[in-house]
Image (spheres, rainbow, N blue to C red):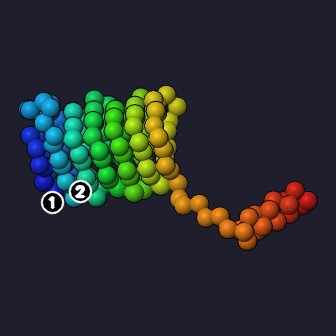
């Protein structure tokens, strides 16, 4: 079970919930949550979770975030690193840096970010030749 470090009220169970304003504005808050977390209020500081982050429509995150995957309907300003997937829904907003394996940005989402999405790119001489041969074969066939 995860535990919050900071003044935000978090109810933990299968999923943690953050739904109130911070009690100490300007205070750096740290959250470490083993399960998923849903944010429908304001979260500032740092969030680390091995689960899923869900940012509701009224959710605002101004933080450095590391999670397994994220589904965003609200707003994130900061750095987001997701092991698997980030899904920015139509009315969401993201400003900052993002790193993930899979990125989905729906039409209507605001996305202003430095982005690193997808797997590693491997380039070597034989790989380039193989790719050129495949393209050549597709064009002639």
Q: Quadrant of the N terminus?
A: bottom left
- Which residue position is annotated with label 1? 1
Rendered location of residue 103, percent (x, y): 49, 47
Spatial separation of the CA atoms under disc 2 and disc 1: 7 Å
Image point (42%, 45%), residue name: 98
State whether residue 141 is above or below residue 64: below
| Mark 2 residue element | loop
| Mark 1 residue element | loop
Q: Quadrant of residue 18?
A: top left
In this figure, what is the number of numbered marks? 2
Camera sees residue 105: yes
In the rendered structure, the answer to whether residue 59 lies left or right of residue 127 reads left
Image point (28%, 29%), residue name: 58
- Local packing at callout 1 (Cα closer than 10 Å; few below 14, some 14-19, many 20+) is few
Rendered location of residue 100, percent (x, y): 44, 52
In the rendered structure, the answer to whether residue 88 lies left or right of residue 3 reads right
State whether residue 112 is above or below residue 5: above
Q: Quadrant of the C terminus?
A: bottom right
- Which residue position is annotated with label 2? 35
Closer to us: 19 or 81? 81
Closer to us: 141 or 32? 32
Rendered location of residue 81, percent (x, y): 37, 50
Image point (46%, 33%), residue name: 111
Does the residue at mark 2 contact the one at mark 1 (Cβ under 8 Å)?
Answer: yes
Rendered location of residue 36, percent (x, y): 26, 52
Camera sees residue 9: no
Q: Quadrant of residue 128?
A: bottom right
Q: Which circle's residue, 2 or 1, is located before the other in the chain?
A: 1
- Local packing at callout 2 (Cα closer than 10 Å; few below 14, some 14-19, many 20+) is many
């Amino acid at each position: 079970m995860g535990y919050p470090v900071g003044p935000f009220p978090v109810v933990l169970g299968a999923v943690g919930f953050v739904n109130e304003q911070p009690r100490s504005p300007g205070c750096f808050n740290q959250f470490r949550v083993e399960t998923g977390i849903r944010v429908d209020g304001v979260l500032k500081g740092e969030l680390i979770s091995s689960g899923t982050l869900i940012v509701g429509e009224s959710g605002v995150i101004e933080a450095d975030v590391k999670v397994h995957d994220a589904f965003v309907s609200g707003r994130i300003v900061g750095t987001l690193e997701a092991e698997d997937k980030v899904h920015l829904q139509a009315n969401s907003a993201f400003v900052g840096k993002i790193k993930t394996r899979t990125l989905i940005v729906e039409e209507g989402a605001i996305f202003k970010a430095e982005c690193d999405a997808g797997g590693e790119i491997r380039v070597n001489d034989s790989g380039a030749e193989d790719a050129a041969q495949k393209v050549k074969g597709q064009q002639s066939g």
